[in-house]
Image: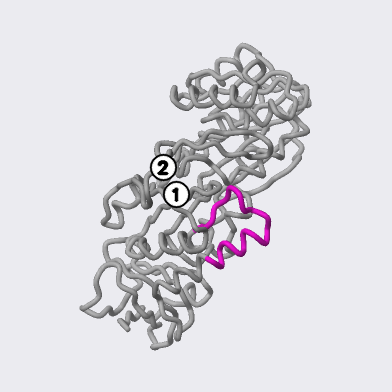
Amino acid sequence: MIPVILKKKIGLRIENGHPWIFGNEIAEADEAVKPGDIVTVFSGDKKFLGKGFFNPRSQIAIRLLTRNENELVDSRFIHGRMEAAWNYRKKIGYTENCRLVFGEADGLPGLIIDKFGEHFVIQTLALGIDVWKPAIVSALELIFLTDKIYERNDVPVRELEGMVQQKGFLSTPFDTKIIIQENGIKMEVDLENGQKTGYFLDQQDNRRAIRHIVKDADVLGAFCYTGSFELHAGHYGAKSVLGLDISENAIAAARKNAHLNGLENRVRFEAVNAFDVLKKWAKENKKFDVVMLDPPAFTKSRENIGKAVSGYKEINLRGMKLLRSGGFLVSSSCTNLVPPQLFLDTIRSAAKDAGKKIRQVTYQAQSPDHPIAWGLENTHYLKFLIIEVSD
């Protein structure tokens, strides 16, 4: 047991359930502790708070794993947490394609595992969990009897933890371009080179939420990536769909997915700068029945929240101006530093500046295989809104 003692006035946030301890909150740490070691954390008055992994190189010096003083953190512990995560997904009906492990929300800080059928993609984003990668792989092999595991640790956040970026097979090699089914639609997923782990599973319920508003509609999708929302619109009976994205590779993949579903005649894609096109078409008074906005995160630092909010307001204002009166705006934000209320206030402000009246149709977060742990704001990162917009 390697003890770490927090400063006298630190501890209430930790006692209330938050698993992160920052470097400036530590009063004493054993000189023998090394990056990645499991430590036992005590409050300033020597009260046991939990056990977690330690990394002095990270701003988050300790990430707690357990509040049970008698629980041993070993490979069996990792296996048990992963099995519990799988049991939760089975109970709520997310089994074929799902986020199997969602970091802190599943009691495994820094670990992301996405399940695509029999394929698994792993991200170990903290040094303390990266140490347990062999145990994680072993647990996947035992629980799922799989030999298709890929590592997508090509993310800059690892460098903040003192690790290198890397990707590759954690099992025998396999074809990393796979086809999954979502809501009756086929999508090709590139596990090796696609965004994040290859596909945005967090929007699977939200994509289904557009099924009524897109029927017989002219639909515009901006920041479409590989076309998942646009293909859902076509599948649900849209009259015409146009998807825009700045990436030529993403558009090529989107066109391939349209062909895969026999929707290439109604669902088209163009490689353009969506910001520029939204502004240009709004000035030209071009109109659609539904406008869908699913941009990437606009900021990953608190210093740029103001710019991110301005960006969201701008695209939503332009989107509203492109709608026929009574049309629908579908808007998403995955920037976890923009909380839900700020996002909704930004939409309200955009409507005011556009001179539009709005009514909320639905507001949702990410699908529940990405559980929101109350008290951990970063686990409630996705905001998804459908509003009716009228003159």
Locate residue 200, reporting x and y percent.
54, 42
Q: Quadrant of the N terminus?
A: bottom left
User: What's the mark number on residue 200?
Assistant: none
Q: Residue at x 61, y 64 (%)?
A: 87
Locate residue 390, reporting x and y percent.
76, 27
Residue extending furthest toward the bottom: 46
Disc 1 target residue: 148
Which is more toward the observer, 366 or 277? Answer: 366
Which is more toward the observer, 319 or 210? Answer: 210
> Would residue 295 be counted in the magenta stretch?
no
Q: Give the secondary structure at mark 1.
A: loop
Q: Are marks 2 and 1 in contact (CB under 8 Å)?
A: yes
The 10 Å Cα crowd at callout 1, few under 14, some 14 to 19, many 20 or more, is some
User: What's the mark number on residue 174?
Assistant: 2
Quarter assignment of residue 294: top right
Locate residue 379, reporting x and y percent.
54, 56
> Would residue 94 be counted in the magenta stretch?
yes
Which is more toward the observer, 211 or 213? Answer: 211
Residue extending furthest toward the left: 31
The number of numbered badges drawn on the structure is 2
Amino acid on which the number 1 mark rests in the picture: Lys
Q: Residue at x 77, y 37 (%)?
A: 359
Amino acid on which the number 2 mark rests in the picture: Phe
The 10 Å Cα crowd at callout 2, few under 14, some 14 to 19, many 20 or more, is few
In the figure, is residue 207 to the left or right of 169?
right
Q: Give the secondary structure at mark 2.
A: loop
- Reply above or below: 379 against 231: below
Task: Identify the image's colour scheme: rainbow, by chain, secondary structure or one colour.
Answer: one colour
- Reply above or below: 45 against 107: below
Stretch in magenta: 83-102
Quarter assignment of residue 182: top right
Locate residue 225, reporting x and y percent.
51, 30
